[in-house]
Amino acid sequence: MSLTDPTPDGRFGDFGGRFVPETLIPAVLELEEAFLEAWADPSYRADLDGLLADYAGRPSPMTECHNLSEQLGCRLLLKREDLNHTGSHKINNVLGQALLARRMGKTRLLAETGAGQHGVAAATAAALLGMECCVYMGEVDVQRQELNVFRMRLLGAEVRTAMSGSRTLKDAVNEAMRDWVATVEESHYCLGSVMGPHPYPWMVRTFQEVLGREAREQSEALLGGPPDVVVACVGGGSNAIGIFSGFADAPTELVGVEPAGGAAIGRGVPGVVHGMESYLMQDEFGQVLEAESISAGLDYPGVGPEHSHLAAVGRARYESVTDAEVVEAFQLLSRAEGIIPALEPAHALAWVSRERASLAGRSVVLNLSGRGDKDVAQMMEILA
Amino acid sequence: MVPYLTGGLGDDWVETARAAAAAGADAIEVGIPFSDPVMDGPTIQAANDLALAGGATPVSILDALRGADVGVPLAVMTYYNIAHRMGLERFADSLLEAGVSGCILPDLPLEEAEPWLEVAADVGVESILLAAPTAPDDRLPRICGRSRGFVYGVGLLGVTGVRAELAASAVEIATRLKAVTDVPVLVGVGVGTPAQAVEASRHGDGVVVGSAVVQRMVDGAGPEGVGELVAGFRAALDTS
């Protein structure tokens, strides 16, 4: 019931690859080998499963939204990644990579972060495993996600502000890659999404498949089979690929929801940045455009290569919603179900809400990838 | 001695290229700015941003080079997406038409280079490949075997920028490359002073000097100031 693996050179159809400076090639080759070896090692898997269960709190539940279902006219279920330790699905990937990095003898974790969820997760794993951690975050995001910056520092991580370009997630990735080029011998780049050079899109997907497997089982139990629709927000696309992976073989419609201001698939054309060939928002000369979204976690002009592939072959479709629709959805879930979502999965709900007519009578599993605590201050200003 | 300068930076960058050639540069590397230059440090990043803000595009830069008659061979350095977006054949053709004989794409490693290498060879543009200090021994001859014009030895673990001292890795990569190839070996990244250039050239065949030149441009030194800088490198290399 899984998605297909990439080719040996890291391609999902026409997308993916390893477009990194020569300096990093030995590191990505070594990482691929180490990941394959670890994944096949029962003791590594036992360590990871143990941490996922006893530290991160897996499995996460699936919640049927009775109130909202009645309001919208579909049967809506939420995969509750918001209930994980650190508040999002990011912990699944980070625990896998941190264990792997330690096994590879690396002493320092490098991470980029947008909303701060991945940065917090990386800082958490580093604290747990006794590693150094350095998180790059765009200046704009440092300002709008102040709470997560403090949280990372509290966890012992160093947060470095990315001042270049659009000063958001894209630039945090650039800075993390520059750091990695200089410190590759001791640092592991703990990339937070299904993007970057091979093996990252594939490795991060593998670490996120746990949530898809659980969601599939929970759907069987609650619905008696797979749902009609699975929907998730897409920035780089790790939570979406995680949940899609559980339903790839089912007759389930897979829908990824991008922010209107960062719709790589919706508005982009194929390009190459951050180590991968994928859909990319860029101008006619190949300069990458700045994304603009209310959500720091989705404020990214690119997308993971496997999503580009799924879009190209038609296995998943990608829609976009506006910031105003997201603000509505954020409040809708809070009031109807007593669950404050992160702004990222509020995108998925915004789509469900808008499409309620076409979804009438159908079952929908939505990946609630994170909780909204981090966004409360920002929403307080928006709703004032 | 190959100075690097950011294309489209200021109104007099072509004149700056001519001045650098007149001051003794053997060839000139022209950067086509890209929005996300992951191999570049703060100096070249800032120059990139300035040039882009000034309206520079790959087309405007190549147009300016066409018929500029700089007097020495020209190579461009840019990132792969610029070539990808234009289409590899059109990109190679437009380099040739602009009188550019070589091309360096620092985010295109050997594993991904094949489509570009084939197009460039067909069109007659020399693809200069980079070799990094992290490369295992068996990788270096493979890189040198595909590199045309010269091979670019990356002098240190890190991005472009001037450092206080030449890294030991610069000497090491030059020595390792010279041991496996007859292709000229130029060392770049972290070569910022005449003394560093002299030391690196002792082990290789020359140097690329980027951030030091670009900083001079950003400071407003103009063609004359950059010419003086290049002449300083030239003199040091000639008397060493």
Image (cartoon, rainbow, N blue to C red):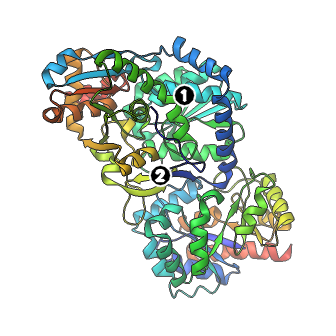
- Please name the residue that numbered disc 2 is placed on: A13
Closest to the camera, between mark 1 and mark 2, is: 2
- Looking at the rendered structure, the kind of residue marked 1 is Val
Image quadrant occupied by the N terminus of chain A: top left
Viewer-closest of B31 and B108: B108
What chain does mark 1 sit on?
A
Q: Around disc 2, counting alpha carbons within 10 Å, would you say few (fewer than 14), some (14 to 19), or many (20 or more)?
A: some
Please rate how many residues cluster around mark 1, counting C-alpha atoms within 10 Å: few if below 14, some from 14 to 19, many from 20. Answer: many
* Side of A206 where A142 appears, left or right: left
CA gap between label 1 and label 2 equals 27 Å
> A31 or A342, which is in the foreground?
A31
Can residue A255 be seen here? The reply is yes
* Residue A57 horizontal/vertical position (percent): 48, 13
Q: Is residue A180 above or below residue A102?
A: below
Q: Secondary structure at mark 1?
A: helix
Judged left or right of residue A172, residue A223 is left
**Mark number displayed over residue A94:** 1
Q: Nearer the viewer, residue B95 or A209?
A: A209
- Residue A382 position in % (x across, y down): 23, 31
Q: Secondary structure at mark 2?
A: loop
